[in-house]
Image (spheres, grey):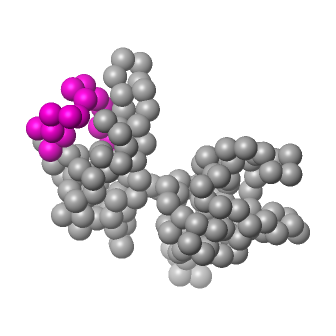
């Protein structure tokens, strides 16, 4: 079953629990595939959210005759070093540092750290040191947030 079809099954269930569907990864485990579902919420998804969504997803996926018989389901939050699955997810992270891995090299680089300057549709404007680069989200193989833990601690402690 293709990823988009799986997303069509998963997203309404996640939304019914008051959470947002963040992303989906499917990887081949040792013997059976692993289906990783990432969820988020305005005030952060909880362990209870993950458990409830996991239970409902297992039930829904087990009755879908097109779905694979055996799989491992993992439901979690994207975490502080969240991976971005869609360009619109980056809108709240302008000014933050990203780790980006491209599908193909640009300027002899495939992997780099960059500060996100802006997002418009699927186009990302980045600062890589003193260099500016504009790329299409579609050429990215992996894009993750590189959290500034000192800043997070300051915000948490109200300083």
Quadrant of image for the C terminus:
bottom right
Tell me if residue 56 is in the magenta stretch: no
Quadrant of image for the N terminus:
top left
Residue 139 image point, x, y percent: 65, 52
Figure disc tally: 0
Q: Is residue 110 above or below residue 19?
A: above
Q: Is residue 43 above or below residue 4?
A: below
Tell me which residue sits at (34%, 59%) in the image: 21
Residue 58 image point, x, y percent: 18, 40
Residue 92 image point, x, y percent: 53, 74
Q: Let me know if residue 110 appears in the view.
A: yes
Instruction: Locate residue 15 relative to residue 116 in the image: left or right.
Output: left
Q: Residue 99 lies in what quarter of the image?
A: bottom right
Tell me which residue sits at (18%, 64%) in the image: 16
The magenta-colored residue range is 60-75
Q: Residue 94 lies in what quarter of the image?
A: bottom right
Tell me which residue sits at (49%, 55%) in the image: 85
Between residue 37 and residue 121, name the one nearer to us: 121
Tell me which residue sits at (88%, 69%) in the image: 130
Q: Let me know if residue 62 appears in the view.
A: no
Q: Is residue 38 above or below residue 33?
A: below
**Which residue in the rendered view is the most extreme toward the top?**
31
Instruction: Locate residue 29 relative to residue 61 in the image: left or right.
Output: right
**Which residue in the rendered view is the most extreme toward the bottom?**
159
Residue 49 image point, x, y percent: 25, 57
């Amino acid at each position: 079953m293709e990823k988009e079809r799986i997303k069509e099954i998963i997203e309404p269930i996640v939304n019914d629990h008051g959470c947002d569907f963040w992303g989906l990864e499917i990887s081949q485990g040792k013997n059976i595939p692993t289906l990783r579902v990432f969820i988020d919420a305005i005030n952060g998804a909880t362990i209870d959210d993950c458990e409830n969504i996991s239970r409902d997803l297992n039930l829904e996926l087990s009755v879908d005759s097109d779905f694979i018989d055996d799989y491992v389901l993992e439901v979690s939050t994207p975490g502080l070093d969240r991976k971005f699955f869609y360009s619109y997810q980056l809108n709240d992270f302008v000014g933050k540092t990203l780790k980006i891995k491209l599908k193909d090299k640009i300027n002899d680089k495939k992997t780099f750290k960059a500060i996100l300057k802006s997002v418009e549709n699927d186009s990302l404007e980045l600062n890589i040191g003193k260099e500016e680069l504009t790329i299409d989200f579609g050429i990215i193989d992996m894009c993750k947030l590189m959290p500034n833990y000192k800043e997070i601690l300051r915000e948490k402690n109200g300083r």
